[in-house]
Image (cartoon, helix red, strand yellow):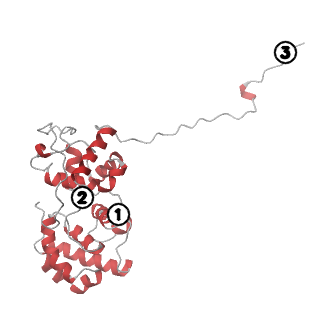
Amino acid sequence: MSSPKLKSSATSSQPEKIIVRRKKKATVRSVYSEAEREEMFRRFSVQRPEPKGELEHSNPFTLVVAVALSAQATDAGVNKATRALFKVADTPQKMLDLGEEKVRDYIKTIGLYRNKAKNVIALSRMLVDVFGGVVPQTRDELVMLPGVGRKTANVVLSMAFGQATMAVDTHIFRIANRIKLAPGKTPDEVEERLMKVVPKHYLYHAHHWLILHGRYTCKARRAECEHCVIADLCRSPEKSCDIPAPLVELPPQVIGEAVE
């Protein structure tokens, strides 16, 4: 009895298996381990349990205006100009009623005040005409407002609406690169990387911790490493001290009287 003939693979009726290889999601590498990043932000949380932005405001609208005015200006300088302005115009409609010329008079001590006054009136007009006088709560809508970029939108989303965002200003951009926490060539690149490397449970306050750390300790001209609570963890080639400063809670922030 002859043995049965084997079917060749060419004539087999079985469907050919197709192997699909899924691309792995790109991961952001950090020079700090997960444990080191956890410890870094734990210390910031002990030092400043409730960090706050230092721009004076009374509602989401005045916050939008204050942050927009703070471009290429100090928070202290903006606060000086807006105290009187916000007393007479703390809503989009009141700002429109005030008019561009008078807005200019209030903010003339701030750099680029002419263009900023135009933007304040234009964003107030859009808020009234498009958003019913209410500041929107999404980034896509906020960046539609004249003079409002991604950084300003992120600050507003965080401070006015309690969303975990990363507003990359000059301080954060400098620190992220200097200490190699989330190096990047652009603010958007740094923002994306910080959102991935900062421990999730510290993300809400993280941008304020980093801003304040950059403003008062890891300064642009010279990092004051002797006052730094993360000096032992820091990987900056510029650092001058390996001994961390005592980890104690700082006095409450006094908004409006900060020294830049």
Residue 40: image x %, image y %?
26, 44
Q: Residue at x 31, y 71 (%)?
A: 145
Q: Looking at this view, name the residue that lies furthest to the top.
A: 1
Find disc 1 in the rendering and name its residue.
162
Give the mark nearest the N terminus, 1 or 2.
Answer: 2
Q: Is residue 193 left or right of residue 52?
A: right
Q: Looking at this view, name the residue that lies furthest to the right.
A: 1
Residue 241: image x %, image y %?
12, 38
Secondary structure beneath disc 2? loop
When asked about the image quadrant of residue 58, the answer is bottom left
Q: Residue at x 28, y 63 (%)?
A: 155
Find disc 3 in the rendering and name its residue.
3
- In-front residue for pair 71/218: 218
Q: Judge whether 140 appears above or below 207 on screen.
A: below
Q: Is residue 103 left or right of residue 30?
A: left
Q: Judge whether 184 appears above or below 102 on screen.
A: above
Q: Label 1 to label 3, Cα distance in Å?
A: 77 Å
Amino acid type, residue under disc 3 in the picture:
Ser
- Mark 1 or 3: in front is 1
Amino acid type, residue under disc 2 in the picture:
Pro
Q: Residues within 10 Å of mark 1 (few under 14, many from 20)?
A: few
When asked about the image quadrant of residue 89, the answer is bottom left
Find disc 2 in the rendering and name its residue.
51
- In-front residue for pair 67/246: 246
Q: Residues within 10 Å of mark 2 (few under 14, many from 20)?
A: some
- Tag 3–tag 2 contact (CB < 8 Å): no
Q: Looking at this view, name the residue that lies furthest to the bottom.
A: 97
